[in-house]
Image (cartoon, rainbow, N blue to C red):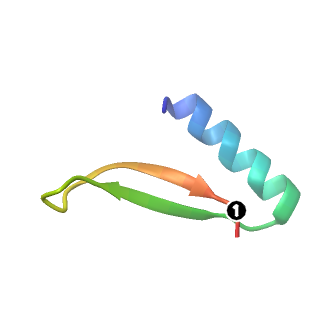
Amino acid sequence: MTLSKFIYILATILSINNAAFIVPLEDRAGDIVGFYPLPP
């Protein structure tokens, strides 16, 4: 996911729900490889 798409999705979730979770994505070694916004 590109940064602009991440910000767009996060802003949309926040405008609708007034809250959002940002979940870190990890690889098998436990290193963070990205983030994903989720609605509450």
* Tally of numbered discs: 1
Q: Residue 38: horizontal and vertical position, in percent?
A: 62, 58
Q: Position of residue 33 (x, y in %)?
A: 29, 47
**Residue in the image at 87% along x and 56% along y:** 16
Where disc 1 sits, the SS reads loop
x%, y% of residue 19?
74, 68
Amino acid type, residue under disc 1 in the picture: Pro
Q: Is residue 10 above or below residue 2?
A: below
Say above or below: 5 vs 29. above
Q: Please state which of residues 38 and 3 is positioned toward the viewer in this rendering.
A: 38
Residue located at (60% from left, 32% from top): 5
The residue lying furthest to the left in this view is 29
5 lies above or below 20:
above
Q: Residue at x 47, y 62 (%)?
A: 23
Q: Is residue 6 depicted above or below 35 in this figure?
A: above
From the image, which quarter does the C terminus lie in? bottom right
Instruction: Give the residue number, with chain letter if any, for mark 1.
Output: 39
- The extreme front residue here reads 28
